[in-house]
Amino acid sequence: MSVRRTTRAAGTGPRITFIGAGSTVFAKNLLGDILSCPALSHSRICLYDIDPQRLRVSETVARRIAATLRATGTIETTTDLSRALDGADFAINMIQVGGYKPCTVTDFEVPNRYGLRQTIADTLGIGGIMRGLRTIPVLLDMARAMERLCPDVLHLNYVNPMAMNCWALNRATRIRTIGLCHSVQGTAAELAADIDVPVEEIDYQVAGINHMAFYLRFRRKGTGEDLYPLIRKVGQDGRMPPHNRVRYDVLRRLGYFVTESSEHFAEYVPWYIKNGRGELIERFSIPLDEYPRRCELQIRDWQNLERELQDPDRPLAVVRSHEYGADIINAVRTGEPAVIYGNVMNEGGLIENLPAECCVEVPVLVDGNGLQPVRIGRLPPQLAALMQTNINVQGLAVEAALTGRREHVYHAALLDPHTAAELDPDQIHALVDDLLRAHGDWIPAALRDTTGA
């Protein structure tokens, strides 16, 4: 066990554990958000990661943030998960099982040999399925540790594939888990810029599933003016940014704007990425193999970023981000209400025309009583039908992860919209075999067993 502790003052604030704190930039943003809240400035922060070098960088950044904000309380770092979770009130999860290398590289390279191209591969598609299969067991082990060490913890999950992970956690453990993403508020800001209306003047309602939720309402505050006509005009005039062409095309065909980016959405449907159809890729500006490129850039920039973040002579700007984590913790601790968008189980029919057992993304009221998801009712039928194509894959991947039945991995891949549009059943079966074999010990042994498959 490796533990280092820095005490600033005898704090009585909440104990907040960062799991995967070596994601320094993301941890920096959340730490700044949390410690800038007066009611949370004396929080007891514990940073946990399996990589000691990255953990040291995050510790340095955390100390600088605390000093900049004159926050009191404690900052602790550890490479021991039990120590990190012991007594935690809130756990913020930001891990990536298998990392860029070897696992993300495998998720792209093996399908590429079959002519199956992807853009991000972290949510759905064959890459999202594999990411879920290697991530869910790790999250379940963490949740079981929480059940022993901090059973009342509120688990804030930022780990993809979001819907699969939250579905499995809520089905198989007693830990309260909410999945958090920034696509809702991020896209709202993009749309505001597209129609030249300040985002602070916009009121919206969103519902669906993670990365496939839609703006059901997009209005001007105060007057109630429907702003959708302005959004549609941007699409009709072709004034949208090139990277948003897929989403504006979906708006034209389905009548509503989707929350997640075009590069993500393009691989959730069978329409935009097709082998031998280069004109589609060009017309919709689809960045194939985008995630590996981003990872390579981040790796190249890491050493410079590490030096900048640790340089005591370089000013460290602490700016409030648009993540929901701090808002949730502050609302629970103070009772001051906040409305966020979160991924929760569809209990009680939050969305009536989606399955009761799936994970949905809806508005959530948070206050001293905890999380209170908002009931939406029925979605427009075309939106619910589209979401169901993704929910089918999510549910089968979760079933495979929880039961260890390899046949459900094949089922998930066979029903995946993009994979099925490109490959025949024999190819899909062979691709699953190749991926499970290539991932090796990153995948549970039961799913690698070909007996009876």
Image (cartoon, grey):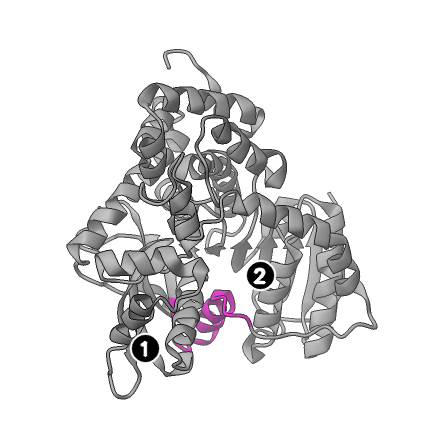
Q: Which residues are magenta?
A: 321-340
Looking at the picture, which amino acid does disc 1 mark?
Asp
412 in relation to 363, above or below:
above
User: For the residues carrying marks 1 and 2, which lies nearer the camera in this image?
Assistant: 1
Answer whether residue 396 is magenta in the image: no
168 in relation to 228, above or below:
above
Q: Which residue is mark 2?
A: 16
> How many other residues sit within 10 Å of disc 2, few (<14), some (14-19) or many (≥20)?
many
Q: Which residue is mark 1?
A: 203
- Quadrant for the N terminus, please: top right
Q: Earlier in the sequence, mark 1 or mark 2?
A: 2
- Quadrant for the C terminus, please: top left
Horizontal and vertical percent position of residue 160: 47, 47
How far apart marks 1 and 2 lie (CA) works out to: 31 Å
167 in relation to 198, above or below:
above
Name the residue: 37% across, 36% down: 398
Q: Helix, strand, or loop for circle 2?
A: strand
Are the residues tagged 1 and 2 within 8 Å (C-beta)? no
Q: Helix, strand, or loop for circle 1?
A: strand
